[in-house]
Amino acid sequence: MVCPACRGPLDAELTCRSCGIAGARFGNQLRFAGFADEELRTDPLNRLKEVAKRRFGRLYPTAINVLSPVLTTRFIKPFLRSFDLDRELVADLGSGTHRRDPRILCVDGASYDEVDIVTDLSSLPIADDTLSGAISIAVLEHVTDLQAHLTEYRRVLRPGGRLLCYVPFIVPFHASPSDYQRYTRVGLAEQFHGYEVLSVKVGAGPTSGMLWVLQEWLAMLLSFGSARLYRILVPLTWVLSPLKLLDLLLARHPAAEVIASGFVIEVRKP
Ligand SMILES: [Zn+2]
């Protein structure tokens, strides 16, 4: 580990000898800079999500898998299986309340119980050329400075190390703590400077893209201008979410990328 600000060495107390920046230990969790609680609570819907994430912890991702209008294709497990996790260090950058494998390093801006290192993802307390792999699942739409993040991830990957990113395309605005951008399949591949692009695929299909937008649209149509009624109606529209199973077929359609809900890109550090 290194200082997230100046990359100098840290002492046993997690304090940087060069610039004085200090991390702190909370049980097994190491905390550097992360999100302030207020930042995670400005958007009303995200405030609700934060309460649910803190209360339900590891059950939260399961609940989202069931209720969400988005059905992702299988890409995380095959990627993780391509590493020997007993020997190779792989990080989940923006892990939230997920712990996809006990051997994975969980890094996030928020201090959920499952997180190993709490830090700003664009300045990681990880030494150069450390990671064999990293995943970033539905995180990069939430950062203002995409290039700063991708440059930082490349720094901590070892040469030949691989990064897997899932980034949405057709999805409504969703704050976490905010939401800044979308990419087409070709647009996404253009962002990874200094990496070798191995593949860009549909990561969630057209039904998922259509459904989430439809749910928001229905809640707006039926709430007659009332923000309160809209917030009550949104969860009721989740009754339509099982239609996402149509993406088991449609995500493979040759035209799926036109309105795909998201793309998954795998890149390698040369
Ligand atoms: Zn320092």
Image (spheres, rainbow, N blue to C red):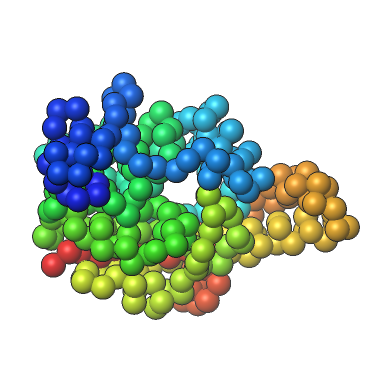
Q: Is residue 157 left or right of residue 184?
A: left
Corner quadrant of residue 267? bottom left
x 32%, y 34%: residue:
31
Q: Is residue 99 above or below residue 13?
A: below
Residue 56 position in % (x across, y down): 53, 28
Q: Is residue 233 above or below residue 115?
A: below
Corner quadrant of residue 259? bottom right
Q: Is residue 63 left or right of residue 19?
A: right
Residue 253 position in % (x across, y down): 49, 72
- Frontmost residue, 217 versus 259: 217
Residue 242 position in % (x across, y down): 63, 49
The answer to whether one can see residue 231 in this image is yes
The answer to whether one can see residue 244 in this image is no
x 24%, y 49%: residue:
5
Residue 102 position in % (x across, y down): 28, 32
- Frontmost residue, 35 versus 169: 35
x 78%, y 44%: residue:
232
x 44%, y 62%: residue:
144
Q: Quadrant of the C terminus?
A: bottom left
